Image (tube, rainbow, N blue to C red):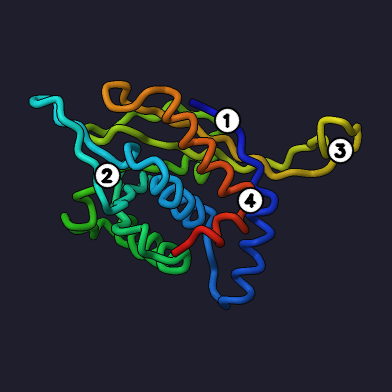
Amino acid sequence: YGDEVDVTRLLEHKRYLEASASTRLSVLALSVKALSLAMLEYPAINSSICLESMTLTLHPNHNVGIAMDTPRGLAVPVIRNCQDKSIVEITQEIDRLKSLAQEGRLAKEDLDGSTITLSNIGSIGGTYTSPIISSPQVAIGAMGKIRRTPRFVDDSSLEVEEAHIMTMTWAGDHRALDGATLARFAERWKQYLETPTQMLLSMR
């Protein structure tokens, strides 16, 4: 499943929040929080499948694996309990894990226990990708590079404005998820990113 996300308002809110909190935030951290909020509504996305018994386990904790490019190759450290973390806390955890990954000092506990994976291929420069699910997880998402793009203001107008557009791609295991569920979940994640006030209102 693929789509485009208009993150123009998200970037505006990011700058406002950074000024208010006197700290740097990342689009990846905002995307992880939006992912967690969307999974509260679609819990089947945050599950794992046992091939031997063909049973599905729903996980109450949102342990999001972040695919990172490191000098030693791909690493997928885990941000645990994202449902309970603030955007600032998620940003801090991403920074900690990135630093450890670059130094080759990720511990086993930093890498084990992810329940879903999010890849930010856009940090390298890619726009579109086809992510591969990491079994026993049942879903993986990939974010493309944010591009400045001209867009019509609305369907009835010829007025054009600048927009910041990010591609998103999702893959799901159809033994656990049907396409409609994955599409609705992806659309909800997109809504949170395109309407960040809705994301802020939904936070616990």
Which circle marks residue 195 in the picture? Answer: 4
Q: Which residue is mark 3?
A: 160
Towards the viewer: 124 or 174: 174
Q: What amino acid type should be assigned to the residue bearing mark 2?
A: Thr
Q: Position of residue 10 (x, y in %)?
A: 63, 54
Q: Position of residue 188 (x, y in %)?
A: 52, 41
- Label 4: few (<14), some or many (≥20) within 10 Å? some
Which circle marks residue 144 in the picture? Answer: none
Distance of label 2 from label 3 (alpha carbons):
41 Å
Give yes or no for contact between labels 3 and 4 (Cβ–Cβ under 8 Å). Answer: no
Q: What amino acid type should be assigned to the residue bearing mark 3?
A: Val
Q: State the residue at coordinates (69%, 50%).
A: 8
Distance of label 3 from label 1 (alpha carbons):
21 Å
Q: Which residue is mark 1?
A: 3
Towards the viewer: 84 or 159: 84
Towards the viewer: 44 or 126: 44
Reply above or below: 200 against 41: below
Q: What amino acid type should be assigned to the residue bearing mark 4?
A: Thr
Distance of label 1 from label 4 (alpha carbons):
16 Å
Q: Which residue is mark 2?
A: 115
Q: What amino acid type should be assigned to the residue bearing mark 1?
A: Asp
Distance of label 1 from label 2 (alpha carbons):
23 Å
Q: State the residue at coordinates (35%, 38%).
A: 45
Q: State the residue at coordinates (44%, 64%).
A: 204
Give yes or no for contact between labels 4 and 2 (Cβ–Cβ under 8 Å). Answer: no
Q: Secondary structure at mark 4?
A: loop
Distance of label 3 from label 4 (alpha carbons):
20 Å
Q: Secondary structure at mark 2?
A: loop
